[in-house]
Structures are given as C-alpha cells and as structure tokens.
Image (cartoon, coloured by chain):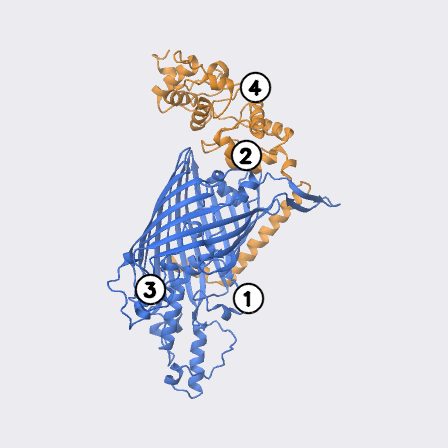
Amino acid sequence: MDGLLMKKLTTHSLTVSFSIGAIALACTLAGTVRAADISLPPDPGARSATTLASWACSKCHGASANGISISPLFPILAGQNPIYISEQLKLLRQHYRADPHARAFMWGISNKLTDEQIQGLAEYFAALPAVSGKPSDNPALAAKGKDIYLNGVKEPKVVKCAQCHGEVGAGTNNVPRLAGQHKGYLALQLHYYHTKLRENKLMNRNVANITDDQIDAVVEYISTLSGTESHDTTSAGDDDTSSP
Amino acid sequence: MRLLRLGAMASMCLLGGSALLLLSQPASAVPPFARQTGLACEACHTAPPELTPFGRRFKLNGYTLTTRPPLVNDIDEHKRNTVWLTDLPGIAVLAQIGYDHYDRAPPDTGQPYPAHAQSDSYQFPDQFSLVYAGAVTDKVGAWLQLTYNGQGGSVGVDNIDIRYSDHTFDNKWVWGVTANNYVTFQDVWNGFGSYSLPNFNTVTLWSGGVGGAGLSGPIINTFGPGIVAGLGGYVWFNDSLYFEFSEYHSSFAGGGTPTADSTNLGVNGGVLDKFAPYTRLAYEYDWGYHSAEIGASAMYVNWIPSVGYISAQQVLAQNAASLASGLTPTQIANGQSAYATAQTFNPGAVNRYTDLTLDWQYQYNGQHNIFSFLGHVTHERQQNSDQLTAATFTSPVGGPIYSNGTDTLTQVLATAEYWRDRRYGGLVSFTRTTGTYDPLAYGGNGSPANQYEVLELDYMPWLNFRFILQYNAYQVVANNQSPFNLSNNAFPNSPGFPNIKASDNNTWIVGLWMDY
C-alpha cells in the first residue's frame, strides 16, 4: 500500500497539475455561480423563502431542503400546516416562544425574517411531501398511548389529543400536524408544555397533569399515525382488542 | 562527531517540533459565529471545540450563514455587488489560563542542580488571542487569529483559514476552496489533527524541557502556523461524503523570501521542500441523535532536515570543500572550514515522509446527554536520505544522522468524552506511539515510544467559560524524550536525577478557558 501510494505521490508534476486543475475547476465553478447570482444582493433580509430554505433551514431541518430533519432535536417540517409554521415563526421572531431550544436555535436565526419570507417558508415546507408514521416496536405501549390520544385521561385530567390534532394526527390551521414527527421532538415539546417552558395556554392546561410514562406512551402511538384518513392503518393498537 | 552531534540536535528539534506549535493551541468556538448567526454555541458544538453535525455544515459552507443585515450593500450600474459589509465585525477575544503541578520537579534549564526547580507553574495567560471569524462576503468566510503566547512571550499569526464555498439548491453538492496555514485546521471532524480531543493543553514538561524534550509524533502534527501554508479544494456530496485535495508549502513566519529556505532551517528541525500534497476522504452517516464518521487522510512530504542552521547537504559539501583545500578531518571537526558561510541554498539531503491516517468519530448528541468516542491511527513511513544514513554514508568527515534507511512510526489516539447538559463533562484519552529503533535519529535508547493517558473533568457554567481539571499520566517515555534524562546528559558532572521513571512526568493541570 505504501509502495503504491509512494509511486503516485512522488510524481511532483502530477500533483501540481492536480492542484492547478482543482483550482481551475473551483474558479470556474465560482465564476458560474457568481454569474447566476449576480442580481441577488447578499442581504439576508432580501433572500427569497426558497433560498432561505436551502441556505439556512436545511442545516437542521433536512440537508436537501426537504424539510425532513435527521436529529429528533429538530422538528420535521415537511407537510406541516402552513398557518402553524407561520404562526410559530412569528412567535419565535418576537421571542415569545421561549423554550430552551427555541432560544438556542430559532430566536437568532428568525430574528430578521420578514412577513413575506415567513409566509413563503410556510408555503414551501407545507408543500413538501409529508412523512407518515411507522408501526410501533412496542405495541403494548402504543396501545396505551392510543387510549390517551383518543380518549384522554380522566383523573388527573389530560385532554385527548385527537380533539384538536385529529384522529390521524393531521392537525388543521394553527394546530400542528403530529403524524410522522420525531418521537423525541414530540416528547420534548410535551415536557416543555407540561412545565410551561413553552407557553401556550391551551396546551399548558391540556397536559398540566401528564406524566412521563403517559408522554412516552402517547408519542409512541403518535409515531404510528399516517396523517391521512384513508391510510391510517398502521396503528399498533388496532390489533389490541383489549384497548378501549 | 560534529555532524553526529548536530544530527542529534536536528532530531531533537524535530521531536520537539510540536512545542513550536504553541501558537496553535485550541481556538475552538468563537462568539462571532453566534453573533453572526444568532445561534447559541450549542448549535455548532457539543462542547467547544467539537462540532455537531450542524457545526460541520456551517464550516463546510464557509462560515457564511448570517442573519446580520449588511451595513453597506452597493449595487453598481452593471447590477453587480460592489461591497458587502456586515454591521458587526466578527471579532472575539479568547483567553486560556493554566496552572500545572508536576509530580516531580522538572529540570531547571539554567542550572545543573534539580533543587532549583519548582513543581508548580502558572501561565497567566497561557494563551490570549484576537480572532476575526465569520463571513467576509456571502460566499467567502474567514478565520484569522492573532495570538499572544505566554511561554514565548510574543504575539504571532496563529490559525488562518480563508474559504470560498457554494452549493446546489438541494445541498447535494457543496464545494469549496480553502487557504489555510495548518494542516487539518480545515477539517470538520475531531478525531485527528488540530481540533482532536483532548484539546486543552497547557504548558507541561514537554513544551520547553531541556534539550528539546518532547514527545515523538508524526511529522504531520507539526505543520502549523508559521511553518506551512496551503491551498485546497473540497467537495461535500449528498450530506455524507467528503473529499479534499490540498497542497502545502513552506511558509515560515519571519523568514526571508520563499525560495530562501536556508533561512528557515533553524526552526522546527528542517524545512518542507517544494509541495506537500494532502488528501482526505471521509464518510459521515447520521441517524436520530447519532452521528458517525470514518475517514482517511494521506500526506506526502519532502523534508530537508536541518543540521544546526544549514542543511545536512551543505554540511557535507562544506566538509568536502574543506578537505579539498587541505584541511584535516580533525581541523574540520574543530570548526575550521574553507567553505564560505553564505552559500546558495542547495536542497540535497531530503527525507521523504508518508503519513497515512485512519480516523473515526461517533457522537450521540441527545437532549441532555452527549457522548463522543473518537480517535485516529497514524502510520508514518520515513525514508531517510542515503547521504545521511549509516549504511550509505560516504563523507570522510562527520557521521550519519540516521541508523536506518527507513523508519516507521505509529500513533494511536482514542478519546471518550461525556457531557451532561453541556455543564458537567469529562474525558478519558489514551495515546500510544511506537516505531522503529533508530539510535542516531532519536538519541538515547533509540526508541520513539511513548504512552500516556489524559483524564479530564470539566465544568462549564456558561458555554464560553469553562473550568478544566486534568491529569496526564505517563507509562512510557523513551529516554530521548524525557527532560529528566536529557538534563542528566546536559549536565554530566552534576548529581542529576536518579531513578528516572515515565511517571515522573505526570502532571496535574487546572485550567480556565474563556472567550467572548
């Protein structure tokens, strides 16, 4: 291996020409791109929503600007309801939504967004193909979560999620789509609502009494939802006849 | 004998080369990036300087992500941007303070008696830096660092990375060009190179010991600011595959013209000859809270070893000319020479190094728990110049510098780090270096071997303010690297240090790192 590499690398002229080639290629690429962007002032406040999605949002919410994040630290935005995205971006921009991750990641980066950009981003991500849930690895837990999701908890009271988010987790208007979302992200948000680190009068009240076990169960069930009425057959709880 | 002695000096300079890289101690996270992006430090860092997947993409995109409005944004009559200036220059200050306690008082370099040495050392500051970091234009970003080095007592140019980057809309292709002065400073993973962990190194025995004491390591580790500069291009494909090709050249800070390498030979044990290609391939796979990387790099170096302050080749030529003029070998050994001191530089005796590195990094970047396991294995093949090697040495005066025609060196480093809520953390790190015995090159028993662990506890009340408690424990330190042994050699008539052990070099370090 050393010998082969040595042969390749000892040829100075070869390496120099590689270098010149690489630089020439880079310059050519640079020139091409600059020509294409020539009329786009590099002002963050003037960038189009789609440019922002590729340039900034993609770093966390899906590298290819597809709105599908890899790490559960960041929500999946693809197919999310546009009114919800728009409302949240405005809450983040004005620093009203103040949960720790909102502060760390979104406060600064949303700071200079214009209303037009927010609207454009909401439409961009809403139009992307949404993610559907998957069958649960833990059907018993999902069944318990299904009960909470569809019926809530009577004592101490936890309001049923389906009341606003729909039986298939699609949400509507400013109520977010939950189907397909990362379990870790959902659990974290429920903790934030429960502890009021994320303020929302309705949600703070709805989950005021929720326990950690109930959070684990309900996000397990939500992760199975498809988000569409006709295809909501992945629910692990469906086979559980003992489930209410 | 003179050549032998000078050869030993050259070798020791090379061994101690890492000590000259003090200017390139950790720079890590800088608030200008946070000011520019509006993001908290944790967006880019698990704990500085280790990067998160986001941090890697920020760097690969040329540090250009910004939410700052431009102060000036002129468009000329051809609708071309003529200037783009942010309203906030990305300036940061960075300070590092260290307090060391040595298990055995180190040698006092000015005195032959160890009783004069102290067991404690306080560096205040160990390092103080001014950094510009951030976007220069919408597609060009830079890291420009100026550092006051406490031990050297001087201010110098430190790490520099200027890069251009662009990408396709779907980010399937990200490409860039980087000009930097530190091999590996441009890298975005932390398993090897300038930002490998552990990253907090204060002044220990190794940074200024007697006779150039210092731990042996691959030559690639010594190519930092003030020694080299390079230009490279890179491609980041499909958010997972990284390829880079760079070339480095000697760029000695304070040196003369680029071709006058002879003026640079006195530093770092030699000088890099012509171009040194460096290439890097890495693959990253992210899933859930996890991120894993495996990569490889290769660097090929032509290296002119210095002998005193001139090249080995010049010494040979000098001796030959002196013999021709009628001087005897004894007279030459006593310093007489017929050779003019101001010679045209002639790079003759060149050693060829091939450094191959395999590196890895696993990260769990959870909501509360962060865990990393990373490291590298570097294998170095050092092909010594025939003119300087024992078996092929032909000069009638002086002596060879190397026992072997080819030497090899292997370094393994593995580190595991854990953080809870980015507040409480710690790491365990293991380093082992082994290689062929070469008594002429390394001196002492001829071994380049060393082995040590770093144990560290961290408390980070704020992400830009960190307390460090570190213990360095040594199991193997070959006698040519140990300041105690070298002190005995330097002062043969003094009582010296009895019963020298590797553990004599164990060191406690209390450190403070901050930037703003």
Residue B241 or residue B228, whichever sits in front: B228
Colour displayed for chain A in the image of the structure: orange
CA distance for labels 3 and 2: 65 Å
- Residue on which disc 4 sits: A173
Q: List the single residue furthest toward the left.
A: B499
Amino acid type for the residue under numbered disc 4: Asn
- Identify the mark at residue B258; answer none if there is no mark: 1
- N-terminal of the pair, mark 2 or mark 4, is 2
Report the residue at 53% width, 36% height from top: A58
CA distance for labels 1 and 3: 43 Å
Q: Are marks 3 and 4 on the same chain?
A: no
- Chain to which the residue tagged by mark 3 belongs: B
CA distance for labels 4 and 1: 66 Å
CA distance for labels 3 and 4: 78 Å
- Chain to which the residue tagged by mark 4 belongs: A
The chain drawn blue is chain what? B
* Secondary structure under the numbered disc 2 in the rendered image: loop
Amino acid type for the residue under numbered disc 1: Pro
- N-terminal of the pair, mark 1 or mark 3, is 3
- Identify the mark at residue B116; answer none if there is no mark: 3
Q: In terms of image quadrants, where is residue B329?
A: bottom left
Question: Which is in the foreground here, disc 3 or disc 4?
Answer: 3
CA distance for labels 2 and 1: 45 Å
- Identify the mark at residue A65; answer none if there is no mark: 2
